[in-house]
Image (cartoon, rainbow, N blue to C red):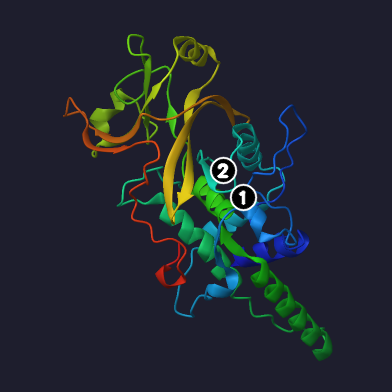
Amino acid sequence: MPTAFWRIAGCLVTLGLSACSKAPSTTPSDSIPPTSTSTSSSHMATTPTALGPVFVRAAEIPAFAENETLNPTLVDQFHRYLQATENLHKRTVAQLRRQLKLGPDQILIIGSGWGDFQRIDLDFSPQHNVLQQANNLAINYIRFWKSPPVLERGQFETQAAYQQRLVKQQQLYRQLNQQMQVDLGRIEDATNFLTKAVLLNPNSNDRLNRFHYDADHAQLTLRFPLQRVTEDDLVNQTEPVKVLQLVVDCAPDLAQSMQAVTKEAYALGIIAKVHQQHYQLQRVVILAYTQLSGEEQFQPLAQFDPRELSLLSISAAQAEPSERIAFHQDQVLPVGLQFYQPSSVSNKPQ
């Protein structure tokens, strides 16, 4: 069993088996009143109805077979993301949920830079399917805990003490597997953990990074490149750059106030609702993004009903974007999801 597993197991015992969807927010009290509509849960005793839709319980998910391989670093990072008491990003998501008054059947996606591994783009096209990847991670996280490490008897340990330790381990994992489940809160955790924040560089205002206001039609158009590049970098790109383009109705004073806020970048947040085991696009949130001492900070500026959220491909050789995929409000995101069916879980875990 990899070393990462032992680190996770130690954390699990120390933290008292906080196995359900989300740990309680440790954000200090502020002017935002708490609501009961968060997908967060507190401890293992929390009832499943507080977690939003539950899709798969641990009892329905098989353990890894002996011939299956696992990237323990990713699971270890995800576990530390879930359990970190000083995880500012996770607290930020919880606070934003309260500010936006999200219900238990809604998910907020802002991405993150937490941890030290390569994140994936927030790309909803069928061939990338980031929501399915998040679902797989949430399931494989449970499968990982279904395979307890083999305990060896210590040199100075009696047989009775060794047997007692084995029984305690079995009880620990049995209790854990009874409580763990894949619910919408865990999917939200996995999606934000896996994906990069989608940022617009306000100092560029080019084909890739755009903040354009049409006063005649009272419409705001924003372009967020999925890679951290500007138009000047296009000549060095071997592949077209994917860009999320957002078009919203916006009053001129709101557009002006958004521009006036001090920030390093604009960040895009997406609110979706579970609809018949698919995600339905509902709203978008524009946030001011800054980094202080390596910690990401997201300040909500405005939320909109999107006229259109498009996925564009832009290259230096083409004047106009190609591969346009458009999503509209209340549209089911076309990512070909087959969610939460144990039979659909890949044998090649994330």
Element under disc 2: loop
Relative to residue 248, is residue 48 depicted above or below?
below
Three-letter residue code for mark 2:
Trp
Instruction: Identify the disc placed on residue 114.
Output: 2
> Mark 1 sits on what residue?
81
Q: Quadrant of the N terminus?
A: bottom right
Q: Position of residue 82 (x, y in %)?
A: 63, 52
* N-term-proximal mark, 1 vs 2: 1
Three-letter residue code for mark 1:
Tyr
Q: Position of residue 301 (x, y in %)?
A: 54, 22
Question: In the image, is 101 to the left or to the right of 328?
Answer: right
Q: Position of residue 150 (x, y in %)?
A: 64, 80
Question: In the image, is 208 to the left or to the right of 45?
Answer: left
Q: Is residue 223 visible?
A: yes
Give whichever of 294, 251 is nearer the camera: 251
Element under disc 1: helix
Pointer 2: residues within 10 angstroms few (<14), some, or many (20+)?
many
Task: Report if the CB atoms under discs 1 and 2 are less than 8 Å apart.
Answer: yes
Pointer 1: residues within 10 angstroms few (<14), some, or many (20+)?
some
Q: Quadrant of the C terminus?
A: bottom left
Q: Residue at x 48, y 50 (%)?
A: 274
Give whichever of 302, 144 is nearer the camera: 302
Q: Is residue 347 visible?
A: no
